[in-house]
Image (tube, helix red, strand yellow):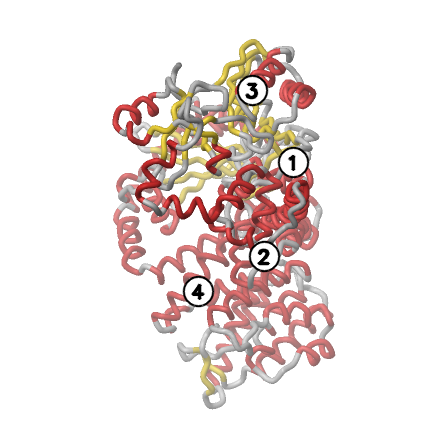
Amino acid sequence: MCAKTLQKEFDDSDRAAIEAAYQDMLASTAGVQSEEDRELVDRAFRVANRMHNGVRRKDGTPYILHPIAVAKLVSKILPGDAESLVCALLHDVVEDTDYTLDQIKQEFNPRIAVIVDGLTKIDRIAESCDTKQTLNFQKLINTIEDDFRIILIKLADRLHNMQTLSSMNESNQKKIASETTYFYAPIAERVGLYDFKVQLEDLAFKYRDPEGYAEIERKLQLSKEQFINRINNFSLPISAKLKKSGMEFSVSSRAKSIYSIWRKMQRKNISFDEIYDLLAMRIVFKPKEGIPEKTQCWFIYTLITDIYSVLRDRTRDWVSTPKVNGYEALQCTLLSKSGNWVEVQIRTERMNAIAENGLAAHWRYKGDNYAESYAKLFELLRAQVTRVRSVPYEGSMDFVSNVHTVLFGGNIHVYDEHRKRYELSRQATVLDFAYEQSRYTASRALAARVDGALRGLNSTLRGGEVVEIIAVRSMMVSSKWLDFVRTQLARSCIKQQLDEQRRTLAETGKQWVANECGKKGAPVDEEQLKAVLPHFEVKDLEELYADVASGNISMRLLKGSLRANGLREALRNSAISRLHWFGVGNKKSGVVTAEALAVEVQQSPCCNALPGDDVCMFERDDHTVVAHRTQCQEGVRLAAQQANRMRQVAWRPSSEQRYSAPIYLSGRDEKGLLENLFRSIATNITVDVHKVDMQSDGYSFRGVISVHVRDVAELRVVMQAMSSVPGVLKVMRVLSEPA
């Protein structure tokens, strides 16, 4: 990433600086003690020093100082791992010199070659620079399945590059800073390297918005002495109470990071002075043996909330349920005596070590080594990456975008009815969960019980809920689902299922059309069918057949359109005929049937009119006919203002056409209620349930179930069936306008 220029051989001062940096790095690697490991690291240094000899960075310093600095950072997060130090020292030799992976394999070992290959950028490709970025991100993500150390070494590499970014031109600074904010800082957080994450975010912000960074930094400096006094005054009574209780503890404080301050200012549209939780205090204690850490954290919480008022909706229990990256703490926000809000983090020494140094800190406390600790975290990451890769993508940019959403967009945990845990991205819906759980069940999903309450498929999950999907065999995948699902997995599955469903429906619809035409001895004329495609606003015959099979296009209307295609268009283009179009029909009643006109009467959503209701009909500008119930206020308004558009059309039920009918229900919430409702409907009559919106407090329920019916008579049968279900006390037809 950092530009390099070839200079003359290093002089004595350069060589002295290189040797000093290397010895300093070795001093930080106390865990690497065996002679064999030391010799391996020394050999890697000699190779890297030889291959980068005479090469300087933009700032004029010997380039070899960069891999040495990266190795020093790596020693903090992977203590005692000689191979990681070797890879850090060699991470640029394949990319920038003639040294090959085969040579690394021969001089070191295949594992080191795999890691160095994972750290080597894709450079020799024909695509644009933007594509190179995304391909390199994609390659890095894919290395999670090879060796978790690749990601950790890459983070150390990126952090040192950000720390020395000032020598780059402004354009490159902004590009690299944006990459860091979007990709590398979230990775650092995801793997538990909080200190790396904060540094990466602040440094990236510094180069993306120098003025914004400088302004916040200036205000923090001006307030520094005031902050110190405030936190000291705030912590004194807390320290006194903790000492009295016999706790072994330390108290430290910090201001929020510059980037987190800016982000909060942007998110809440507030000024620096309006941020109430600029201060944070950390209580780190040594837990007493025999008492659960969680109990001791809550004990401290009780002590300090006896001193200060607590903002209860800001309390976060990351002890009971740690974050995905392993972070644990009990956090609360307290009001000081001077009227300032202070965030307090309560941690054990173990929790604090993990928060500062990542999961490598586990080895000191649980007997695991760093590799075992990171392996547990990366096992979950590997599973997620494998699942993301199983979904088809249009390209590397699409892949990286969706990996970012899944891995770094902020995640929540939810549980199925068997208490199996699932991880979803924030803002995921019930339907997203259904696809995470089972593609087959999701395709037949109707609703869900979320913590016992009935919820629709588009309900957003917050995290921690128990979700039970309610599936019905007759349900079909809907294209409308794409409007609210959030995960790429759900979106890809829905698109694929819609394609499969469309092909199946098209075959069925084609057979239906052939059978209907065949009844009268007429062969299927596809040219005539193509002529009516614009009338139904479909692009091809396959879509037409699918719409016939799904009921979106009635067979009656299709046949009427085929018969009247030429004549009806001529009539509609004639001014005289337009005036009398709706006057042709039964001379006694003045009423013409919809079939005779080859028009389809549409249901108005304002009053949910059905065949069999007392209705009034109105012609729209596009020549469609809309039915309103006679008591509908919108129908009354149209009759008063546009009486010339009123038409008399006999609206008869059709075997192919179905209309939406919402039904209100309430009663006692009994086990299996929704399933019994669906069973009662299916037993009595064949109708589609297309929407459910129910609420329950555990004792009683109320809500709306929408069904597709032929007419009022069929609706009455459905409502009677619902009324017979135990627990149902009230069943009413929903009318948007009162009768």
- Judging by the rendered image, the residue that carries numbered circle 1 is 444
State how far apart marks 2 and 4 are (Cα). Answer: 18 Å
Q: Nearer the viewer, mark 3 or mark 2?
A: 3
Residue type for callout 4: Met
- Judging by the rendered image, the residue that carries numbered circle 3 is 715
Residue type for callout 1: Arg
- Judging by the rendered image, the residue that carries numbered circle 2 is 77
Q: Nearer the viewer, mark 4 or mark 3?
A: 3
Left or right: 295 as drawn, with respect to 642: right
State how far apart marks 1 and 4 are (Cα). Answer: 50 Å
Q: Nearer the viewer, mark 3 or mark 1?
A: 3
State how far apart marks 1 and 2 are (Cα). Answer: 47 Å
Structural crowding at the residue carrying mark 1, measured as other residues with C-alpha within 10 Å and reported as few (<14), some (14–19) or many (≥20): some
Q: Nearer the viewer, mark 1 or mark 4?
A: 1
Q: Residue at 70% x, 48% y: name it.
A: 368
Q: Earlier in the sequence, mark 1 or mark 2?
A: 2
Q: Secondary structure at mark 1?
A: loop
Q: Position of residue 245 (x, y in %)?
A: 52, 25
Structural crowding at the residue carrying mark 4, measured as other residues with C-alpha within 10 Å and reported as few (<14), some (14–19) or many (≥20): many
- Judging by the rendered image, the residue that carries numbered circle 4 is 162
Q: Secondary structure at mark 4?
A: helix
Q: Residue at 51% x, 82% y: name it.
A: 15
User: Depth check: 3 or 655 in front?
Assistant: 655
Q: In the figure, residue 276 lies in which quadrant? A: top left
Q: Residue at 46% x, 57% y: name it.
A: 182
